[in-house]
Amino acid sequence: MKIIKNSKDKLYKGFLLVKPDGLRYTKKVIKQLKKDKYKISGFYLIKDFLSFSDDIYKISKNEDFNFYEIMHINNIIASKLWGNTAILIIVEKQEESLLSFLRKLDKFKSQIRNIYSLSKQKILHVLINCDELGVDVSCSIKGEVKIVKDNDTLVPYRYPDNHGNFVWIGFYLLHSSDCDNKIYEQEMNYIRNQKLFKIPRFLLGHMTKSYSKML
């Protein structure tokens, strides 16, 4: 049976930011986008992921400043571990409303994370010593790293300095357009004002093949 779109549906545009820790899954993300009937209107190279992602997250930091701080730390660590480049994918799809489009894109992001993110699978999380990183984070916890097992408190691994201001982070591969209309518009305006390098299809194929070999 052929599904005919409602004639009132409009074409909406959004973005997926493939972070440094998610680059190895770019080919799989593209394959799933096509399977879910998204039109990909462009791939863009983000040469300075840390600056770009910080600017994107700053747009919504008034809604949750602690979240912005944690994501800033997350992005610093991701850029140190996997490099400071990322890929921005602009996608389009017909939906009955912008909110419907954004929610479905957010759900797509979550599905990819659930499949490939070790942090989402509760396998990998990292404690970051903000003092040693040189970043002041208001929601960090000052103390010593320990594990509580039943009523016993254990130090999992002893090293010369087990003290600091710590935050807990994970790695989630992708970021997508915000579901809030106002924030979404600000994000898209920011992206439109950036001078980004559009990756040709043939070059993207070489890049995704290279990243896939990292698996």
Image (cartoon, grey):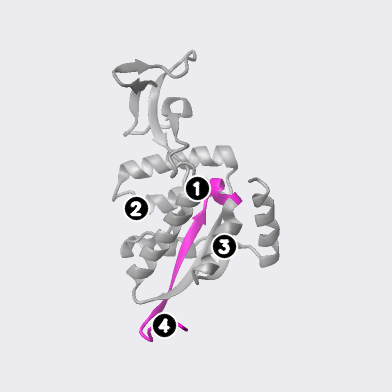
Q: SS for tag 3?
A: helix
How far apart are labels 2 and 3 at the CA level?
27 Å
Residue occupying image coordinates x 65% and y 56%: 208
Give the residue number, with chain letter if any, for mark 2.
60
Residues in magenta, as a range: 1-24
| Other-residue count near label 2 (Cα within 10 Å), few / some / many at <14 / 14–19 / ≥20 | some
Residue 7 shown left or right of residue 85 in the figure: left
The answer to whether residue 127 is above or below residue 181 is: above
Q: Is residue 100 visible in the rendered structure shown here?
A: yes
The residue mark sitting in front, 2 or 3, is: 3
Q: SS for tag 1?
A: helix
Amino acid carrying mark 4 in the image? Lys
Give the residue number, with chain letter if any, for mark 1.
51
Quadrant in which residue 182 is drawn: bottom left
Q: SS for tag 2?
A: loop
How far apart are labels 1 and 2 at the CA level?
15 Å
Give the residue number, with chain letter if any, for mark 3.
30
* Magenta stretch holds residue 198: no
The residue mark sitting in front, 3 or 1, is: 3
Amino acid carrying mark 3 in the image? Ile
The residue mark sitting in front, 4 or 1, is: 4
How far apart are labels 3 and 4 at the CA level?
23 Å
Q: SS for tag 4?
A: loop
